[in-house]
Amino acid sequence: MAGADQDDSLYPIAVLIDELRNEDVQLRLNSIKKLSTIALALGVERTRTELLPFLTDTIYDEDEVLLALAEQLGNFTMLVGGPEYVHCLLPPLESLATVEETVVRDKAVESLRKISQEHSPVDLEVHFEPLVKRLASGDWFTSRTSACGLFSVCYPRVSSTVKAEIRQHFRTLCSDDTPMVRRAAASKLGEFAKVLELDYVKSDIISLFTALASDEQDSVRLLAVEACVSIATLLPQEDLESLVMPTLRQAAEDKSWRVRYMVADKFSELQKAVGPEITKNDLVPAFQNLLKDCEAEVRAAAANKVKEFCENLPEDNREQIIMTHILPCVKELVSDTNQHVKSALASVIMGLSTILGKDNTIEHLLPLFLAQLKDECPEVRLNIISNLDCVNEVIGIRQLSQSLLPAIVELAEDAKWRVRLAIIEYMPLLAGQLGVEFFDEKLNTLCMAWLIDHVYAIREAATCNLMKLVEKFGAEWAQNTIVPKVLGMANDPNYLHRMTTLFCINALSEACGQDITTKQMLPVVLKMSNDQVANVRFNVAKSLQKIGPVLDSNALQTEVKPVLEKLATDTDMDVKYFAQEAISVLVLA
């Protein structure tokens, strides 16, 4: 009996070994994902003495299996007996942190960082810190890159002698021969600086930062820019000028556009980190240069930050800096040759109106908005229209209607149907921003005119637009404003326009509700069943099928059913087909 028990307890690990040796990757992956269940079945002691050594010895597998293993081990603390035994998880994770596949290494480092928090300070020095040293002095660059991510988690909780060793290892990795290692060190420089004592930030980190920021590889230099934000926030104001600014100036004018792009991308964070004085003297000229950069990607990244940069300028001379330094560059970007740059600018330029106030907006910004509203790139126009509300707050709806509305109307009547289509799609957005009274006064006629456009795509989009407007403004507005006009088209001599009435009814019935549909729309649809054009008649059948669910059963039986039965005996094949389909869908047979 004891022997049988023994066999039973060996069963989980035997199954695991079988599955991990199976040729099918999916089976191996599934068994790794069930690792916690197996560990539970084995108990903490056998997990430590049998399962973990087995896993450590057999780490030669497909990357996706290793990735799953690295993730699982990060949650294994309780399964090996809690924090006092957590160091047992280090050997398999150390092996995983040295494999060739980056995704696996990153996941192993993530799990190591997680379980480092569960080590006691003593265990950290006895078990974890030696692992970091081994990785940092490994022969392969893979282990050295992994080490970079582990320094900051163990540094705060070790003794001062061990701290000195950790700093030395980090210094060594920052000047490693392999660019991948320097890149990893540069990416963790800011994080490591945050856990260091201020004196060491000044004595160690600044020199490393300067060296990495002038590395021969641009991929290393651009990561140093990211670290610059963290370092600048740690240093007192008086040290920034001498310790950080020379390197930052150099990065803003770097020969590689990727580095300049990174400076532009992080500009608002840098601005907050260095404070108002340095911003005024140094960052304003640097920002101007980035807005005029020869590379479109850099200009686009800088254009994206225009509003944030202006908002964060010191209030006492914010307006003067924007008007004299930033606005001239913005004016040039409005007519940039690259559409991504113009689009990036259009998404933020409207925000300047709240900063500059009414008079400046009317005089300087409105002409730019108008130019962008007429831009040939639809994204630029959309970005302007979708941010109209912040200009509306500053200059008021009347001023806006006098200046911007003519441009919108011009686009709505453009000869190119695709331009008209683009404006229709923005209409619900505009309506929401401008309000119902203004919409009825200025834009309603436009929306109705699109319903009789000679291009079908426009008529279809206009129908969809009406539905969105009704959802925004409500059924009562629809009943008074939209429905009468739509139903009036039912008598239009052009059969295409009569069909548009039916399409509108299909779209509006649900939004308008049962009452309006039954009393106002249904009679018109039923009347159109006698139309001379077969296309209109079969669309009547389709409409009745569509609005059927909105109607009550009485209307369906007494009004809809007779009409559909009549259409089902029509001379036209299509009319018959759609009428019969409607009868079966609405269960009227």
Image (cartoon, grey):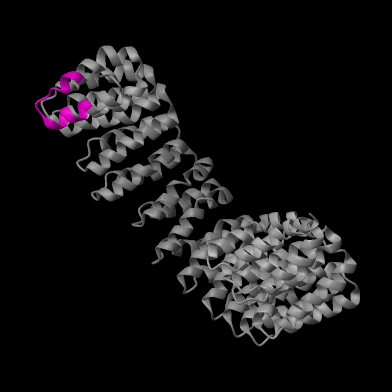
Eyeballing the image, is 514 above or below 228? above
Specify start and end residues of the magenta stretch as a single range: 565-580
Secondary structure, magenta segment, majority class:
helix
Residue occupying the point 19% across, 32% down: 497
* Residue 486 in sight from this viewpoint: no
Residue 350 in the figure: left or right of residue 252: left
Quadrant in which the N terminus is drawn: bottom right
Q: Residue furthest left?
A: 571
Residue 199 place in picture, x, y as percent:
85, 74
Residue occupying the point 62% across, 55% down: 311
Residue 9 place in picture, x, y as percent:
75, 57
* Residue 249 in sight from this viewpoint: yes
- Give the quadrant of residue 186: bottom right
Quadrant in which the C terminus is drawn: top left
Eyeballing the image, is 93 above or below 505? below
Residue 62 place in picture, x, y as percent:
57, 70
Residue 112 belongs to magenta span? no
Eyeballing the image, is 509 above or below 562? below
- Give the quadrant of residue 448: top left
Q: Residue furthest bottom?
A: 177
